[in-house]
Image: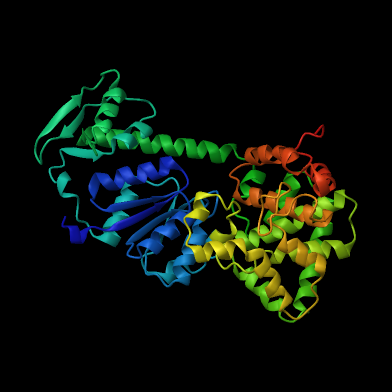
Amino acid sequence: MSESGKKTIIIADDEEGIRDVFSMIIESSFDHEIVLCDCAASAIDAIRKNPSIDLIFSDYNMGVDNGGDLYKFLRDKNLDIPFTLCSTYSPTEIEGFEDFDTEHPQNTYFQKPFSSEDIIKRIEEVCGDDIDPSSESHSFVKVSPERFMRLNQAKETFDVFIRLSKKKYVKIINEGESESFGVIEKYIKKGIDYIFLENQKYESFETQAVESLFEKFEQKIDSSSKEELTGIVLDSIEAIQGMVKNLGVSERTVELIDKVVKSTELMITKGGNLTDLLSLLNSREGYIKDHGYLCSYVACSIAERMSWKTEGIWKKIITASLFQNISLDENEFAMIYDLNSKEYKELEDRIQSKIKLHPQDSVKILSNAEGSFSEDVRKMIQNHHEFPDGSGYPRGLDSTNVSPLEALFIIATNFSHSLVMAKDIELVNILAQDYNEKYNMGNYKKPYQGFLKAFVKLVPQNN
């Protein structure tokens, strides 16, 4: 294949095994450039750096974000890139993918588990069927040595070759030879890019790797409870309510909060420009919307256990929850909580400033809207990224410089963030128990005790 015929393909999946299998299958037949991304934000960054992407394979749920964020970015920017959704969810089940089949003639969907034939056929359809010239004899197939060792879970041995020239291959490992990984590691240190397997052996290895990967995937799905899977796609109030109930909040409390959420939405729709802002929030599918509504239920659950049960307080909490990130127009920006993180530091200065100042900017947007907007709501939004030790932003307030209501909202905001980002309930358990050291101080003490009482399933009650 000529250099001009080389295509660029993005593989976005948070599972390294999936990325490895995709890469191995593509490299076995093509000489295209492969860009590996472990989340939607990483894929978006890759596209910004190189808009000439020819094809995307993307998972839906990727822990920190989802394929919906990536697909929305393509639509918002009017980018003509074929999108392959690879998920257990079909596009008809996911909000934002309603017109997936018609928005681009080459969009398609792979349901996990999929096969190597699916991947190769897809690339041939979109990118053409030019194969890698190094594979023209079909006698040997190249494999990245690092990828070979990661995917070879059974450590099965094969005849392994390196290529000296287009037609000359030298065997470096005999099938059945012990310590074969040690030999491969030595060649990696020498800078070798690929090892080679005979075609028939490669097919056996590929089949083994794919079957092993999806066997683990299916076991994971089968062993997950319905409540744990609820958190994968928070695309409705019902899903959010289900998650909160599973975390230990009583059904009665959730029903009471739901009534106040609906009452608050009704109040907002009568508040002039706030109606437009609520519509804007509901149009932002993904993290911003999910986190806002989830925070409403988490914060009110904590307030209820602190005996702050008045509808007036709950409406303030819910308003702050819904609009805390209203000044941000990208889910990927709202998901950044740590200003020392790699994701934040790699952003351009303009975006960094936007993220750091978004609590104040959200307050300004609401202050300019017609309708009531209390001082308590303003302060909750303005301070929702502060921390008890003063390491937060934008003002670095410590535990003595925020009110108990603001402290409650900060705990709820951070916990809701952890819930949306976490892949499973066990990670949330660990995070919740770490809150004792983080929040059991100053004006955070009473809200923290309310948090302990609200989420009884997560935190041992002897804390």
Image position of 287 with respect to 249: above or below: below
Q: Residue at x 57, y 68 (%)?
A: 329
Q: Where in the figure is residue 65, as x and y percent of width and height?
A: 54, 54
Q: Residue at x 22, y 56 (%)?
A: 129
404 or 51, which lies in front? 404
Q: Considering depth in this image, is 60 or 330 the residue closer to the camera?
A: 330
Most distant residue in the top direction:
178
On the image, the x and y values in percent for residue 308 come to 89, 55
| Snapshot colouring | rainbow
Where residue 463 appears, as percent x and y from the top left, is: 80, 34
Quick one: 368 or 291, which is closer to the camera?
A: 368
Q: Is residue 342 left or right of residue 173?
A: right
Residue 270 versus residue 172 in the image, above or below: below
Is residue 286 visible from the viewing direction of this image? no
Residue 395 position within the rendered picture, expressed as x and y whole percent measured from the top left:
69, 59
Residue in the foreground of this view, choosing between 114 and 43: 43
Quarter in which the N terminus is drawn? bottom left
The part of the image, by quadrant, that contains residue 188 is top left
In which quarter of the view is residue 171 placed? Answer: top left
Q: Is residue 268 above or below residue 209?
A: below
Q: Do we see residue 444 in this rendering? A: yes
